[in-house]
Image (cartoon, helix red, strand yellow):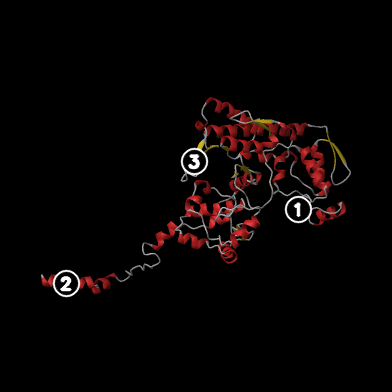
Amino acid sequence: MAACMERKINSDEQEWILEPLCFPEQPATDIGTNASSHHDMEVVTCVLCSHFAPLSEKDRLLKHLVLEHKLVIADVKLIADFPKYMEYWKNRISEKPITDFCSVIKTNSQGPVEKQEHYFLLCDVLPEDRVLREHLQQKRLEEILEQQQRERDDDSFQRICMFCNDEFTGNRSSLLNHMAREHSFSVGLPDNIVYCVEFLDHLQSKLDNLQCLYCEKTFRDKMTLKDHMRKKQHRRINGNNSEYDCFYIINYLELGKTWEEVQSEDDREMEDEDDDWSDWQAHPVCAVCLFCEQQSESMEKIYTHMEESHGFDLHKLKTELNLRFYQQVKLVNYIRREIHQCRCYGCQEKFGSKPEVIRHVMEAGHVMQLPETSTWDQPQYYFPTYENDALLCALSDSDSESEHTGPWGDVPVIAEDISNLKVLKQTSVLSHLLKNTDSSS
């Protein structure tokens, strides 16, 4: 999926992160969002009370659900019709207890009872929820196909080419084919596009703002922009920019899948078993330092950087505390979350910004100072603070390592050479002892 958005809520001196964060990359838009903006004014009502909010302020309603009702809805961005989804569950929850539909999660399970809270998770693990999401997805696909058919049959289209002054009337395909043929600007086959007018308006607004359609750099005048797009061959849109996804039919075909995922599945079906993969190159994954923006494709370099630049030795903590794999995961997620929330993970002191808390951690010597294990060894830290945190992939399992070292720790165990077993038996001390026993008897 293309995007992951932070939602942080402050209430009663507590901070909540409703979804995993994501290290900086290409900003994304929700492909489920209709290109037409009139849906944003639709009102969505809470499933447990009379509170409501416009669809455009969906995040405010989700915040209300968490703070007031301890209810979390999973993968909201994959719900095709959020108002209908909420309406359905409002009716169902009015008929039966919420626990019949939601998983119950207890936070701070090992802490004091008064600090424990129960949260309700509504997700597609429940077959009824899964069926509902698929039904809404199917209905949306039908609406999109109907919209596309209307655009195909529409002969009232009228627009001036964004690259020249030619005017086109009749069917939209005449303009799209003209831009591809005369200006080498192709957005794909006309039959693959939906909400064509909004799509062209979006592209025109970028050009009006002197912005390249591919690299999205801004230039000082139209002539400079025109020369740039011609010389750099940027008369095309960037397929990796998910803000265009809502204008292509392929992005509505399967629940939760982008055009890249659907296309890759189609490609795999066409591949022969004897394909040559010798030229295939894996995309490197960069790990990010716990305390700064330093990144590296090598995990050892990140470990070395954290130890030399910040005095943080994860290997040492793992050995001293005998941390198992999932405890390491919890610890890394705990430190990430505390620093993101501008709080020292060692003493819990709160600061106004990340640089301030990092400076405090260094100056106060709290880099290797961890709180009680019960503070960070909690179920909520199973979930990554940053969804694309490659550092979690580099953690090793202490249990698996101990299996290789055996009960004697680092003492090597050398296998016995049995290549000449006959000679070994003849010269064995045990053979002499057995002979002496037989003779004495």
- Residue 280 visible in image: no
Q: Quadrant of the C terminus?
A: bottom left
Please state which amino acid type lies under the numbered disc 2: Lys
Q: Residue at x 59, y 28 (%)?
A: 90
Which labelled disc corresponds to residue 435?
A: 2
At 79% across and 44% down in the image, what residue appears?
203
How busy is the neighbourhood of tag 2: few (under 14 within 10 Å), some, or many (20 plus)?
Answer: few
Quadrant in which residue 294 is drawn = bottom right
User: Would you identify the image quadrant in which residue 421 lies?
Assistant: bottom left
Q: Foreground: 74 or 308?
A: 308
Q: Secondary structure at mark 2?
A: helix
Q: Is residue 401 above or below residue 438?
A: above
Q: CA distance from mark 3 to mark 2?
A: 75 Å
**Are the residues flagged by discs 3 and 2 in contact, CB closer than 8 Å?**
no
- Cα separation between marks 1 and 3: 53 Å
Secondary structure, mark 3, is helix
Label ID, residue 114: 3
Mark 1 vs mark 3, foreground winner is: 3
